[in-house]
Each structure stands twice: as C-alpha cells, then as structure tokens.
C-alpha cells in the first residue's frame, strides 16, 4: 500500500510522528507536510505564489516540507512522491478535535477531503482534547489506529467521501470502543474579541470558546464526550438534494 502522510500542524508536530509510526507498519510511507503550523486554514489552496519544497527526514522516511497549506501538501505529494498515484492519504494526528462544523475550518480534514477529490481514500484523525493544557495522548490514537487499521481500510467508501476520525484524548484503557456517527453541532461563543494594544489602538482576536452540547444523539460530539472513537463519513458533495428535489418536482 502506498501511503501519503500529511497534517496541518507542521513537519515537527508530535502527532505526525505517531501517525507515521503506525502507517509504516502497513505500507510504503512518504511524508509531505507544511513547514510551519497551518491550523484552521480549511480547504485553502495556494494559487498566486510559488510553492517551495524542501527535503526533510522523519524517522528515516522520505519527507518533504511545503511552505503552503495541507491541500498544497497533498497535491505536491502526488507530484513529487507518488506521480503514479497512491492508495491512501492519512492526515494527522491533530492536536485537538475536529468535530461537527470544525470540518469546514480544519486543515487536517481538508487534506483528507483533497484525497477524496483525487479519487484516493482519505482519513483524517484527531485527538479530542477539550481543555487547554490537557495531554493529547497521541499514543492512544496511534494504538487505536493500528488495532483498527484493517477495519478502516475495508470500509466501503463512496465516491467523493472520506473518513473523519476523532479519538478521545484519554488513556487507551478508558476508550469504550468506536461508533459510526453523523456530524454534530460544535459552535463557538465570543468568536471575535476586541482588544487594545499598548498604544490604545483597537485590534480583534478571533477564536472563541467551543460550546460542547453532548445532548446530540448519534453524532460525533456525543460519541467523543461519551468516551467512544467517532468515525464519520463526510462527502465533498455539499448539494442539498432535498431542496433540489423540491425545486424540481417530478411531473
């Protein structure tokens, strides 16, 4: 199996090393990752600037850095590392959750999405830690992935669909299993905060605190809060078919 590994946390991220250590047990691995942290960049693509690619080394595996976004890394990887295509794009392990609406912002998820667009199986994996300073327990995510590799790889995947996996950031013995579930709602309060610099000039800081409502049956939010690994099939086709059918009623 030909595997391209990437992330949005950068080439030096701890989660990347854990992901590579699992992937190398199951196939031929090559790495293309951002040269710096690129979180919350969404499915952006560099179009008006050149991309600089440099050689790197992660655990003795061929690796390259790109001064761009995760989507750029996937496309560069398919040019530099796997010009004949690969079988799998693995993105992560992200240091934080990518639940619900997070998938629209996440660079981690965007890399798996780009894989799906290219007709390649894509899997994004994230550690769902909710409190600042809490350990991410990457080892838990890595062990779960290794133990469940065959299951993930055997899942029937529809065209333009990829898999978003969120692992509770706990010790492995505390995991209750895994569930297949839908996206939930994960919204943020105080999204933009007005502040002033030392000279009294206003500036705005965007971020906010995530509001986690676990009362969302059948969703990734409920699953992770309850101690289960959440596996969500996500499609790139955002068409609202119910609205489309209403606008084009059958005669």
Image: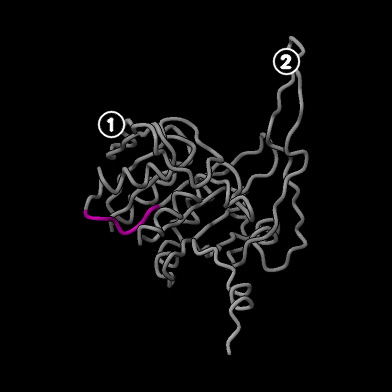
Q: Residue furthest bottom?
A: 251
The answer to whether 166 appears left or right of 122 in the picture is: right
Residue 161 sits above or below residue 60 on the image: below
Which of the 4 image quarters holds residue 12?
top left
* Segment tinted magenta in the rendering: 84-89
Q: Nearer the viewer, mark 2 or mark 1?
A: 2
Q: Between residue 102 and residue 2, name the one nearer to us.
A: 102
Other-residue count near label 1 (Cα within 10 Å), few / some / many at <14 / 14–19 / ≥20: few
Identify the residue position indicated by label 1 in the image.
55
Which of the 4 image quarters holds residue 242?
bottom right
Q: Picture coordinates of residue 177 (x, y %)?
A: 59, 64
Secondary structure of the magenta portion, mostly? Answer: loop
User: Image point 62% across, 66% down: which residue?
Assistant: 182
The magenta stretch spans residue 45: no
The image's mark for residue 197 is: 2
Using the numbered discs, state the Cα–Cα distance from disc 2 to disc 1 in whole angstroms: 39 Å
Q: Residue furthest left?
A: 84
Residue 159 sits above or below residue 122 on the image: below
The first of marks 2 and 1 along the sequence is 1
Other-residue count near label 2 (Cα within 10 Å), few / some / many at <14 / 14–19 / ≥20: few
The answer to whether 208 appears left or right of 155 in the picture is: right
The image's mark for residue 169 is: none
Q: Are marks 2 and 1 in contact (CB under 8 Å)?
A: no
The kind of secondary structure element at disc 2 is loop
């Amino acid at each position: 199996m030909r595997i391209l590994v990437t992330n949005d946390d950068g080439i030096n991220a701890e989660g990347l090393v854990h992901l590579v250590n699992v992937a190398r047990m199951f196939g031929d691995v090559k790495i293309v990752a951002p040269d710096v942290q690129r979180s919350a960049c969404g499915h952006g693509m560099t179009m008006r600037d050149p991309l600089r690619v440099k050689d790197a080394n992660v655990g003795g595996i061929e690796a390259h850095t790109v001064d761009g976004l995760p989507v750029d890394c996937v496309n560069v990887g398919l040019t530099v590392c796997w010009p004949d295509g690969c079988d799998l794009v693995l993105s992560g392990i992200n240091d934080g959750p990518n639940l619900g609406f997070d998938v629209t912002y996440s660079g981690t998820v965007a890399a798996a999405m780009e894989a799906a667009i290219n007709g390649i199986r894509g899997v994004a994996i994230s550690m769902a830690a909710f409190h600042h300073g809490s350990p991410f327990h990457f080892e838990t995510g890595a062990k779960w992935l290794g133990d469940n590799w065959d299951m993930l790889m055997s899942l029937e995947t529809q065209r333009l669909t990829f898999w978003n996996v969120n692992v509770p950031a706990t010790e492995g013995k505390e995991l209750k299993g895994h569930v297949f579930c839908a996206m939930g709602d994960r919204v943020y309060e105080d999204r933009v905060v007005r502040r002033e610099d030392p000279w009294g000039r206003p500036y705005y800081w965007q971020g906010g605190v995530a509001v986690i409502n676990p009362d969302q049956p059948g969703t990734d939010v409920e699953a992770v809060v309850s101690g289960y690994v959440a596996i969500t099939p996500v499609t790139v086709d955002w068409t609202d078919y119910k609205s489309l059918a209403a606008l084009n009623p059958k005669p």
